[in-house]
Amino acid sequence: MKPIYVFSSGRLSRRQNTLFLETEEGKRPIPVKQVSEIYVFGEIDFNKRLLEFLTQNKIPMHFYNRFDYYVGTYYPREFLSSGYLTLKQAEHYLKPSMRMKLAELFVTGSLENLRRVLGYYHRRGVELEDVIQNILELIESAGQAQTIPELMALEGNAREVYYHAWSRILPPEFALDQRTKRPPTSPINALVSFLNSLLYALVLGQIYQTHLDPRIGYLHETNYRRHSLNLDVAEIFKPIYVDRLIFRLVNRQQLSSKHFLRESGGVFLNDKGRQMVVKEWEAFLQTTYKHPTLKRSVSWRTTIRLELYKLEKHFLGDRPYQPFKHRS
């Protein structure tokens, strides 16, 4: 099974056990048993019968607007939900010490992977020792934080230091002097925002395949936001999945100014750039490596699911959670 990305405008419909995507390029059948998720970037028409069909086949559908902003997800009725596990998740949120411990682990896991990504380039001749030392000090400080806002501020400080170091890794035209989001004001900001949104949706789709409730987060506040657990887990994987892919695409000159456009006061990937980035993103997720604990090959997509299983065991009291650390 694999995700389907819809870039063109048209209509998505069903006929018996087959999805059909009809665009100006023609009508294409999509066997539903081969689809794990659907990512919609174009203007797509569909009806309630399609949503019923997606629910029956347990297929989430993620929506993006014309500026590549994540709009939301059609999240079918949970089919693996566990009342007991949901209660344990809520317990870990409602008890301050439990919540704080998990939030700290998400932050330290994220910063440790930042450090390891920097270490990879430092060993290859990029002078990053001062930045790495700064990140190490911030990791040590995380254990002294008393509140969630303190942890969030610490992570923000680390990200600022880390992003400034990108000018030593990337060519000048892709330097990240300032992180801007809505709208992104440079090609590098557009890349970060777009790939982050793909990661958030990826984690959400993997949560759907577990017993976890995506509405209960720990670092990111569980309030009026529909989903927050995926944002927590994504923090750990941003350096490995998003940042390393950006470095590779830019330094190998697969991406250039021709893949971006300026519109409505911001900078965004154009159609060609978006499709190329998605292609490389999917190729990365399908890449396998030897898992240090399982001692067998797993894909980077599967790695997210394994991380969620670790959280399930933590909530159930089977094994304390430890965030994934990349072997750079």
Image: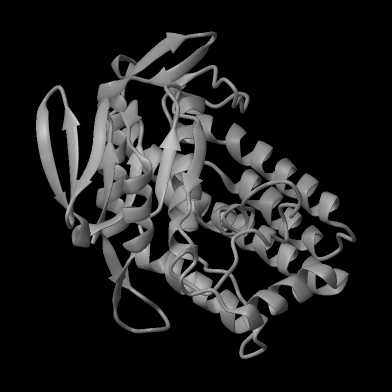
Which residue in the rendered view is the most extreme toward the right? 146
What is the quadrant of residue 268 in the picture? Answer: top left
Residue at 34 percent across and 25 percent down: it is 43
Image quarter where the C terminus lies is bottom left
Residue at 34 percent across and 16 percent down: it is 257
In the drawing, does residue 50 fall left or right of residue 242? left
Residue at 17 percent across and 42 percent down: it is 20
Residue at 44 percent across and 33 percent down: it is 64
Is 160 drawn above or below residue 260 in the view shown?
Answer: below
Res 126 visible: no
| Residue 207 point in image, percent of width and height | 49, 64
Q: How is the image coloured?
A: one colour
Is 75 drawn above or below residue 306 in the view shown?
Answer: above
Q: Toward the viewer: 254 or 16?
A: 16
| Residue 82 point in image, percent of width and height | 57, 79
Q: Toward the viewer: 256 or 263?
A: 263
What is the quadrant of residue 285 in the picture? Answer: bottom left
Res 146 visible: yes
| Residue 298 point in image, percent of width and height | 31, 72
Which residue in the rendered view is the most extreme toward the bottom? 318
The image shows a total of numbered marks equal to 0
| Residue 237 point in image, percent of width and height | 51, 56
Image quarter where the N terminus lies is bottom left
What is the quadrant of residue 183 in the picture? Answer: top right
